[in-house]
Image (cartoon, rainbow, N blue to C red):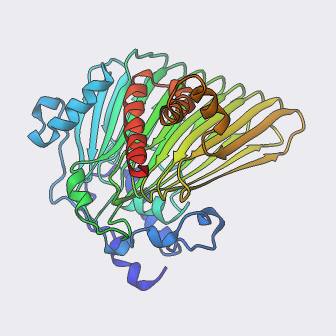
Amino acid sequence: MSDDLAPPFRIEKSHDLDAPWALELRAQAEAALEKLAVPEAHEEIWRYTDIARLPRVDSLAVVSPDQPVSPMDSPAELPETFAGLLTYLESFGPRSALIINTDQGVVLAQSDAAGLKVAELERSPEATAAGSLVPTDQDLFTALNACHFNGGVHVTLDRAVRLADPVMVVHVMGDPGTAFYPRTLISISDLAELEVVEIFLAADNQAHEASRSDGEAATSLCASVVELAVGDGARLDHVGIQMLPSTTCFIGSQRATVGRDARLETGSAALGADVGRLRIEADLIGAGGEFNAYGLYVGDQARHIDFRTQQHHVAPNCKSKLLFRGCVGDRSSAIFSGLIRIEPEAANSDAHQASHYLILSPEARAASIPNLEILNHDVICGHATSGGPPGEDQIHYLATRGIDPSVAERMIIDGFFADVIGHLPVACARQPVLKEAMALLGAIREEAK
């Protein structure tokens, strides 16, 4: 790591209130940062992302609160600036808990459900698993997150507790020109069942959009870490919605462990940021475990979207399924790279992967790269991918039945997304995601006129 990048990597805030595990995690991150460097274009993991579009982390301010933030336990206590956010969250319907995390720390932790605990991660002595799923030294950004996260979110559900309504976790980015490091740990005990919706957005989109001239690199960074631990016989449904302003670079790492006879279903919607990159990994460590992942993305303007996934079968008799669909228009680009890895001990695995995309303009680009590493012959495994413009035959078929070609194309695109949106594991997230995706597609159509 070059010397000119050293100052922002140092921790300047007080950690007097950190739990012992958090202090150790930060120490490990500091040591890792002595060896890690800014990504380079020749690295395979960054091969399809233009490194020049990443913001210089040494130029971004890291928020360091003078005083620790004390989370409120009622939305009514929040400042008026959160009114618009709270109104938006009402569209998701009833909830079991609401946690709002900012670059200052957790400002709201509301929960009335028995058996459910929501707390600030860095102060929680029970969060000893934090940092054990996503390696601190995985890359520069996971190390920076471990160093600099404020507050963080810790959600735990007791054994055999089943909640009817989802937990809402909202990460709110602050001012332009800053680096935001949200961190979440969700631990589901044996036989428990929980739904979680996690949203990434900015407090003031207009301020962010005004901070950059056309053609410049992103002026802000959101580097997120999400860890999901699903106990034996438990079920976790998790949806992540990224809708940050186009001045932001989002780099996220999400990793899960799935226990014996447990099930994890995740949904990921990439609907914002100038560069949006998310790494999704699940380790099926218990026999009979199941992991299903669904994702969608819409690229407009010059947005770049990058998904890296891994379905990792460690134990026998496990199942996994992945379905991603996306559209790119204007001058946007997208890359999906997915790996199914089946270990020698993972006999009787059943794993599938599918990624499909539509290209809506001549200047847009997309690619899908499926990978298989199968180390046991007693498996069922497969992958599928497709890409290109909306089918001319389909448009012609609808046109012969009196439907205008532009309307026919819109119907095809809407139907293309319907399958994956209908599979998002938390039902209350489907309509808000659909509304945001359709708004972006509408903007692409207007640009094309």
Q: Where is residue 242 in the image (x, y as percent from the top left)?
A: 40, 44
Q: Can residue 219 be seen in this view?
A: yes
- Whether residue 394 sits left or right of residue 188 in the image: it is right
Q: Is residue 255 visible?
A: no
- Residue 219, relative to residue 366: is it above or below? below
Q: Where is residue 114 in the image (x, y as percent from the top left)?
A: 33, 17
- Residue 61, relative to residue 423: is it above or below? below
- Residue 198, relative to residue 280: is it above or below? above
Question: 167 or 158, which lies in front?
Answer: 167
Q: Position of residue 236 (x, y in %)?
A: 51, 27
- Which residue is at a point 41% across and 17% down the rendered structure image? 163
- Where residue 257 sits, quadrant-wise, is top right
Question: 441 or 121, which lies in front?
Answer: 441
In this view, the residue farthest toward the bottom is: 3
In this view, the residue farthest toward the right is: 377
- Whether residue 98 sits left or right of residue 234 in the image: it is left
- Whether residue 181 sits left or right of residue 266 in the image: it is left
Count the marks: 0
- Which residue is at a point 43% across and 26% down the rendered structure image? 430
Q: Position of residue 334 (x, y in %)?
A: 55, 54
- Residue 328, relative to residue 431: is it above or below? below
